């Protein structure tokens, strides 16, 4: 076997060994509500593009957020994801948010419970945790 052939074989073998046990990025994209039963009261599809948006009184039903590839949107906030660290079970996301006349950086500590459930932890506030459920439309 030629030297470059050996290298190729080593790379292929190591790829096969790493992929099954390696951490996979969690797909956060979608609409997330604090209660799966309230999805239809928190979110609605509107416009020609049938885009997911918040209902007028979404906060009454627990609220939530919409995650896109590079953004997190709340009812009154629009945040751009600046960095994301993801080991498949824990997500640490730093976003830059604009609301009205002010921008601020916010850090989210999320734990993956399953594909459709996450919890947000609030470091420094013992026992403070909010669960979110992925809404299916």
Image (tube, rainbow, N blue to C red):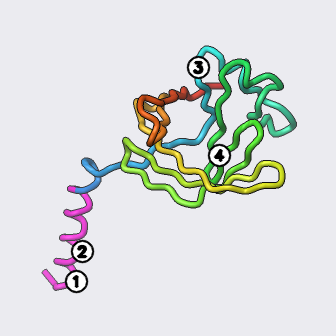
Question: Residues in magenta?
Answer: 1-17
How far is mark 2 from mark 4, CA to CA?
40 Å
Q: Is residue 44 positioned above or below 75 on the image? A: above
Which of pointers 2 and 4 indicates the residue nearer the eye? 4
- Residue name at image x 24 percent, y 70 percent: 11
Looking at the image, tell me whether mark 1 or mark 4 is earlier in sequence order: 1
Q: Neighbour class for label 2 at 10 Å: few (<14), some, many (≥20)?
A: few
In 3D space, how far apart are the residues under numbered discs 1 and 3 (Cα atoms)? 55 Å
Q: Which of 25/119 is in front?
A: 119
Which residue is tagged 2? 8
Q: Main secondary structure of the magenta part?
A: helix
Q: Is residue 121 left or right of residue 96?
A: left
Mark 1 touches mark 4? (CB < 8 Å) = no
Is the C-beta separation of discs 2 and 1 under 8 Å? Answer: yes
Residue 4's tag is 1
Tag 3 or tag 2, which sits nearer the N-term? 2
Label 1 to label 4: alpha-carbon separation? 45 Å
Q: Earlier in the sequence, mark 4 or mark 3?
A: 3
- Residue mark closest to the camera, 1 vs 4: 4
């Amino acid at each position: 076997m030629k030297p470059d052939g050996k290298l190729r074989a080593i790379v292929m073998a190591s790829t096969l060994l790493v992929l099954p046990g390696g951490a996979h990025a969690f797909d956060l994209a979608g609409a997330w509500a604090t209660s799966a039963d309230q999805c239809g009261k928190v979110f609605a599809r509107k416009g020609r593009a049938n885009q997911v948006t918040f209902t007028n009184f979404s906060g009454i039903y627990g609220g939530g957020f919409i995650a896109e590839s590079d953004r997190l949107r709340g009812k009154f906030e629009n945040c751009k994801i600046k960095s994301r660290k993801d080991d498949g079970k824990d997500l640490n996301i730093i976003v830059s948010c604009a609301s009205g006349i002010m921008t601020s950086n916010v850090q989210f500590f999320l734990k993956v419970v399953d594909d459709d459930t996450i919890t947000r932890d609030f470091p420094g506030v013992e026992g403070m945790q909010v669960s979110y459920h992925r809404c299916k439309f």
